[in-house]
Amino acid sequence: LLNEDGSERTRFSFPRQRRGRRLCLADFFRPEETGETDVVGLQIVTVGNRIGEATAELFETNAYRDYLELHGLSVQLAEALAEYWHARVRAELGFAGEDPADVEAATFLNDVFALKYRGARFSLGYGACPDLEDRAKIAELLRPERIGVQLSEEFQLHPEQSTDAIVIHHPEANYFNAGGARS
């Protein structure tokens, strides 16, 4: 990532697939040699501390079913918030019109999970970007403490119902597992 003056601000390294197309997240960006500017989205979202406190209280009082239901809901709310901001990125980049037109809940969610829109959110710790230490780079850039999110020494986000991602807008960006050499 570059500063406005063109100097390097930070650098991410991603593993490359060992088989298939041998993809790496870097493949979804224009090479530096082209001289063209490219865009990457970074996001951190949270549903906040209060829901974490409520789930902890339920757990401590042995209300396990209520704990599991509220915890599951809060995790899904964090994912929905991340998806909302991803949709905003697509709109700001001018290709939200490529999103599925069907807003019926079941069909729309299937389209979201099947990536039937342009781009993808790659969360740290998963196959295409497994290095959790990269969270420190994202945290330095976004300053998540402004929204109540802290990064632990183990590179975990707190509160738990928070998520981060590298948002890639390339039309072929899709989820994949990688391993092997980094690019």
Image (cartoon, rainbow, N blue to C red):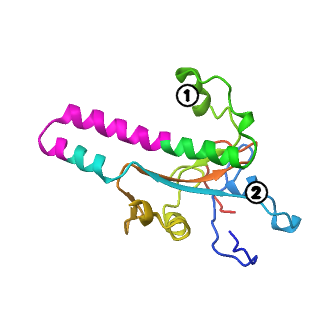
At x 68%, y 54%, the residue is 25
Residue 143 seen in the current view: yes
Closer-to-camera residue (5/183): 5
Which quadrant holds the N terminus?
bottom right
SS at circle 2 = loop
SS at circle 1 = helix
Q: Which residue is mark 2?
A: 29
At x 72%, y 58%, the residue is 39
74 vs 29: above or below: above
Closer-to-camera residue (159/96): 96
Residue 177 seen in the current view: no
Q: Which residue is mark 1?
A: 109
> Would you say residue 179 sits in the magenta stretch?
no
| Furthest-left residue in this view | 61
Q: Earlier in the sequence, mark 2 or mark 1?
A: 2
So how many labels did they put on this image?
Answer: 2
Q: Position of residue 123 (x, y in %)?
A: 53, 51
Q: Position of residue 9 (x, y in %)?
A: 65, 75
The magenta span reads 57-80
Q: Position of residue 42 (x, y in %)?
A: 59, 57
The disc label shown at residue 56, or none: none
131 vs 171: above or below: below
Q: Amino acid at mark 1?
A: Leu
| Magenta-drawn stretch, dominant element (helix, strand or loop) | helix
At x 43%, y 60%, the residue is 147
Closer-to-camera residue (54/16): 54
Report the mark closest to the observer, 2 or 1: 1
Closer-to-camera residue (171/81): 81
Q: Amino acid at mark 2?
A: Phe
Give the Cα separation between the discs numbered 2 and 1. 27 Å
Q: Position of residue 130 (x, y in %)?
A: 53, 56
